Amino acid sequence: METKQNGPVGRPRGFDADEALERAMLVFWEHGYEGASTACLTNAMGISTTSMYAAFGNKEKLFRKVLERYTEGPSGYLPRALEEPTALGVATAILAGTVRTTTRPAHPHGCLGVQGALTVSDSGREVRDLLVAWRDNGYSCVRERFQRAVDDGDLPPQTDPGLLARYVTTFAYGIAVQAASGVGRDELQELADAALRNWPLF
Amino acid sequence: METKQNGPVGRPRGFDADEALERAMLVFWEHGYEGASTACLTNAMGISTTSMYAAFGNKEKLFRKVLERYTEGPSGYLPRALEEPTALGVATAILAGTVRTTTRPAHPHGCLGVQGALTVSDSGREVRDLLVAWRDNGYSCVRERFQRAVDDGDLPPQTDPGLLARYVTTFAYGIAVQAASGVGRDELQELADAALRNWPLF
DNA sequence: CGACTTCTGCAGCGATCGCTGCAGAAGTCG
DNA sequence: CGACTTCTGCAGCGATCGCTGCAGAAGTCG
């Protein structure tokens, strides 16, 4: 005989953790890890600091959760781009995705993975390193995709996949900085188009 | 009859303001405006907080002084690059200067003008805007230089100088982010070379 | 119902933030 | 010398930082 056993024990949460995480993401995105105070975060999340700490652990763990969300949400264009059939298609999709994500009207401008913790105080070093690793992971995925394109004959055999991946990611970071500075979407997309003319580049 | 009148009145400073400014620059460069606490700054400068405030006013004014120093020092390659005889020479010198300055061994990696205040808390907005204006000024100088190159016939008449200037500055910002992430000088210089192949680009 | 578990609101922790008042040191000037 | 000016060291300001203890609220379970 099974007893009814739906909800978890204890007092249920008075807020939607997913929605709260989304709002925290927007705050970290705009102000960066250290520029976003716990007061600013919890205020935007609509919960007390106690609830935030009970649900997410601490500020750094909250940021890690936010980064996961960002990776699968706003930054989800990257894995999709890698599935494009040609290397040029991959590069085009990456830059177009970067432009769109870094200049979305109702969102903070720029890229969380770049501006989230580019410089930090001593106490923020781990988060800075986390984003360094995040960017490095993105670079590696692109490089491996271009390596495959070389192997498949899609790119000329003398192509250096690492160099080409550096080119695309460097340009994406530059676009992110421009977007954070207020440069408009149309101009950046025009720029992205121009950056990929003369393909294969080198 | 003139009386001897060399030194200024009052107790003389017990430190070299120029040397102190240089050390403050390195701290802001590495940690950013908000990541560099007054304690961290004055400790590096080798003076008390009182002396720092007496000499420079406050933290924001200190940063402005530091930015001036950075502009004339580490970032001095930009005005020199603009004096190159050809547009390609200008672009080449800008990217080479960026690579060198953002990867200097005994200096913080990256660019103060980019990572100094890309994201800030509410109280840092003015400094963020200052760096946005700083980057925008750099862009404008490059655009005007390329416009001149078009007028002189050095660049094809259909060239968009603004777009080309965006290309170069965007790439420079991207290099700055890569350098801040630990990517090495040689790889970035190779990348800069590759970015300017196929000149005129578009 | 009572036992148990988890979440919430309040109130406040110690540490650090940028910054300053004040007395005295250290110089120039007449 | 004494009057004056500026800089320095000490000590500490109010505000904010990230974070937590604790009592009670609000649910499940038998």
Image (spheres, coloured by chain):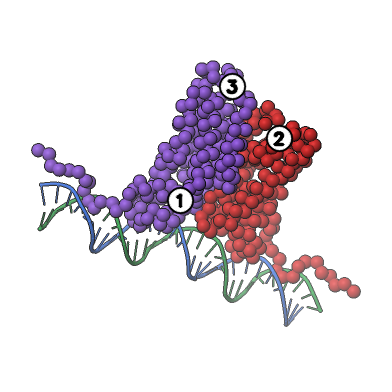
Chain colours: A red, B purple, C blue, D green
From the viewer's perspective, is the residue at label 1 or at label 3 nearer? 1
Chain to which mark 3 belongs: B
Compared to residue A117, the image places residue A160 above or below, namely above
Residue A105 in view here:
no
Quarter of the image that includes the N terminus of chain A? bottom right
Which of the two discs, 1 and 3, labels the residue nearer the N terminus? Answer: 1
Residue A97 coordinates in the image, percent (x, y):
69, 39
- The reply to whether label 2 and label 1 mark residues of one chain is no
Give the CA separation, mark 1 to mark 3.
41 Å
Along the horizontal axis of the image, is A182 left or right of A169?
left
Residue B187 coordinates in the image, percent (x, y):
60, 40
Query: Circle 1 sits on which residue?
Result: B27
Which label is found at residue A159? 2
Q: Amino acid at mark 3?
A: Thr
- The reply to whether label 1 and label 3 mark residues of one chain is yes
Label 2: element kind: loop
Residue A106 in view here:
yes
Q: Amino acid at mark 2?
A: Thr
Chain to which mark 2 belongs: A
Give the CA separation, mark 3 to mark 2.
28 Å
The residue closer to the viewer here, B180 or A4, is B180
From the viewer's perspective, is the residue at label 3 or at label 2 nearer? 2
Label 1: element kind: helix
Label 3: element kind: loop
* Rendered residue at 65%/50% (across/down): A134
Which label is found at residue A6? none
Give the CA separation, mark 2 to mark 1.
40 Å
Compared to residue B62, the image places residue A62 above or below, namely below
Query: Circle 3 sits on which residue?
Result: B159
From the viewer's perspective, is the residue at label 2 or at label 1 nearer? 2
- The reply to whether label 3 and label 2 mark residues of one chain is no
